[in-house]
Amino acid sequence: MSELSDIRREYSLGEMHSENVPDDPMELFNCWLEVVKDSEIKDPTAMSLATVDDNGQPFQRIVLLKRFGDDGFVFFTNLESRKAQHIAINSQVSLLFPWHTLEKQVAITGVAEPLSKTEVLKYFMSRPKDSQIAAWVSKQSSPISARKALETKFSEMKAKFAKGDVPLPKFWGGYIVKPTSIEFWQGGENRLHDRFIYEKSAGEQWARSRLAP
Ligand SMILES: Cc1cc2nc3c(=O)[nH]c(=O)nc-3n(C[C@H](O)[C@H](O)[C@H](O)COP(=O)(O)O)c2cc1C
């Protein structure tokens, strides 16, 4: 068994050259996500979401990206969860796409804003019925006595909503992260990795710089 300190590898899958890097980070993100979706990576849309509590203590957890566009990056969650409580205190968040098996990562900073009820409802209605019921069952991030309690509540809710549509719980919704910076990292040979960061200026234009690895 190798020592942890001996675990390393060379990165050689690609290089980034400024003449080929688009001015619009969303164009580059879209391009990378397509590569990831076509790869063996499971959960290609999984991203780590970092928030901070009222003491400045950061916490991260994975959520799934459900949409992105010029307006930002969208995920759905419980509006009474720890992450939602953090965002209510400090809406500045960070997202990380850990596509390291492709020698890539994308790191984002931004501001999380609640999604419109219309968008939440549209997405909620598109979910499988059992997922809709599960949203009713879990008081996310609260202590519970045992798994059995969840299972019992799931059966109760399944019976309750057996007929007709499952209504949207008032404590369920989503956020759009409006990016202020987006950094792309591509592993390179001899640790000469490529890093391009796009930062939003006051005029809402993206400025791009290359960073040392
Ligand atoms: C692959 C994966 C995908 C997940 N997707 C979501 C998601 O889209 N929304 C969500 O609320 N939690 C998702 N979770 C669970 C979160 O990581 C987390 O446990 C939960 O949201 C509670 O976080 P909090 O207590 O910090 O609010 C996912 C977990 C994994 C491992």
Image: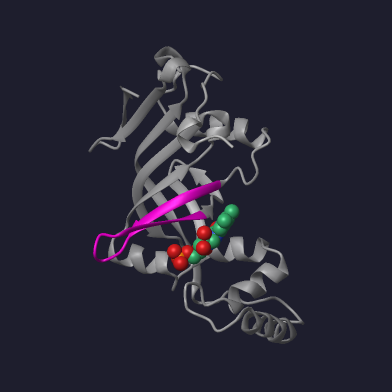
Residue 64 or residue 42, whichever sits in front: 42
* Dominant secondary structure, magenta: strand
Look at the image and give the residue range highlighted in magenta.
46-62
Q: Position of residue 135 (x, y in %)?
A: 59, 72
Q: Position of residue 53 (x, y in %)?
A: 30, 64
**Compared to 125, does 14 lie above or below?**
above
Left or right: residue 84 versus residue 68 is: left
Q: Position of residue 158 (x, y in %)?
A: 72, 81
Q: Position of residue 139 (x, y in %)?
A: 52, 77
**Quarter of the image with the C terminus in it:** top left
Q: Classify residue 54 by image quadrant.
A: bottom left
For residue 61: magenta?
A: yes
Q: Classify residue 132 by image quadrant.
A: bottom right
**Compared to 213, does 175 lie above or below?**
below
Left or right: residue 23 versus residue 75 is: left
- State the residue lying farthest toward the right: 163
Residue at (66% x, 75% y) in the render: 133
Residue at (74% x, 79% y) in the render: 164
Residue at (51% x, 21% y) in the render: 10
**Quarter of the image with the N terminus in it:** top right
Q: Classify residue 165 by image quadrant.
A: bottom right
